[in-house]
Image: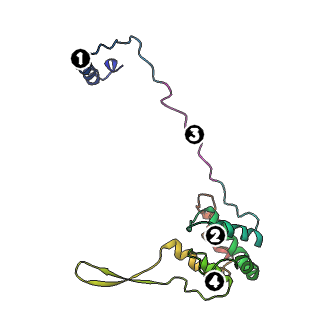
Amino acid sequence: MYKQDEDKSISKLAKTIEKAWGLEIEKDDVKEEVQGLWRKTPKLWEVPKFKLGEVSPEALTDLLAVISERKECVEDITFERFIAMANNIAYKNPDEAKISLAGISSNDSSIIRILGRWAKNVENNICPDSIRKVWNSENEAVKLVYGELLYTRSAVLFASIDKFPCLLSTPSYEDLSISLGDLFARLFNI
C-alpha cells in the first residue's frame, strides 16, 4: 500500500525498507478509495434547563441527605439545587427551613456546617481570614489569605440564607450557566 502512495518520498522509503528487510510485497493494482472521511456535522446539543423541582421542606431534607453523603463539597447541579431550594424556603419561612436543616452537625467539616449553625441560631465566623507566614526570598513576611471563591460564596450565602428572595448565581441550565434574561429577572426581583 505504501509503495502505491501518491507521495513519492513515502513510496521510495517503503521500497528501501522492503529491500533492506528482504521482503517482496506484491503491488496491488487496485487503489482503495477512502470512505467515511467526512461525516455530516451533528446537531448542536441543547443544554437542558435547570429545574428546581418540588420546593418543600421534605424535598430540602432529601437533598440535604444526598449532599451530606458526599466526602467533600462538590458545587454541581445537585448542590445548586440544594442551595436554591434552601434559600427559597428560608426566605419565605425561615422556621420551616431551620427544621429541615437542623440535622446538620456543627462539627461537620464541610461547608454545610455553616448552614447547620444558621439553623440552630449559632453565631458564625463565616469567612475567617487566614494569616500565613511566608518566605519572600529575603525574610519572613506575614500574608493575609482569603478563602477560595466558591467556599466564600457558600459561606456568605449560608450565613444569610433567609435574607434574599432569590440567588443571582442559580443556574439557568444544567451546565451551571446563567442566561442573561434570568440574571436580569433576578436583579429586578431583588
In three-dimensional space, the C-alpha distance between marks 3 and 4, rounded to whole angstroms, equals: 49 Å
Q: Indicate the secondary structure of the residue bearing disc 2.
A: helix
| Residue 56 in sight from this viewpoint | no
**Residue at 28% across, 84% down:** 140
Q: Nearer the viewer, mark 3 or mark 2?
A: 2
Q: Which mark is residue 68?
A: 2
Q: Earlier in the sequence, mark 2 or mark 1?
A: 1
- Residue 128 vs residue 59: left or right? left
Amino acid type, callout 1: Lys
In three-dimensional space, the C-alpha distance between marks 3 and 1, rounded to whole angstroms, equals: 46 Å
| Residue 103 in sight from this viewpoint | yes
The residue labelled by disc 4 is 117
Q: Earlier in the sequence, mark 3 or mark 4?
A: 3
Q: Position of residue 161 (x, y in %)?
A: 65, 79
As drawn, 39 above or below 82: above
As drawn, 114 above or below 181: below
When asked about the image quadrant of residue 70, the answer is bottom right
- Magenta stretch: give its range: 35-47
Q: Nearer the viewer, mark 3 or mark 4?
A: 4
The residue labelled by disc 3 is 42
Q: Which mark is residue 19?
A: 1
Local packing at callout 3 (Cα closer than 10 Å; few below 14, some 14-19, many 20+) is few
Q: Indicate the secondary structure of the residue bearing disc 4.
A: helix
Q: Earlier in the sequence, mark 2 or mark 4?
A: 2
In three-dimensional space, the C-alpha distance between marks 3 and 2, rounded to whole angstroms, equals: 39 Å
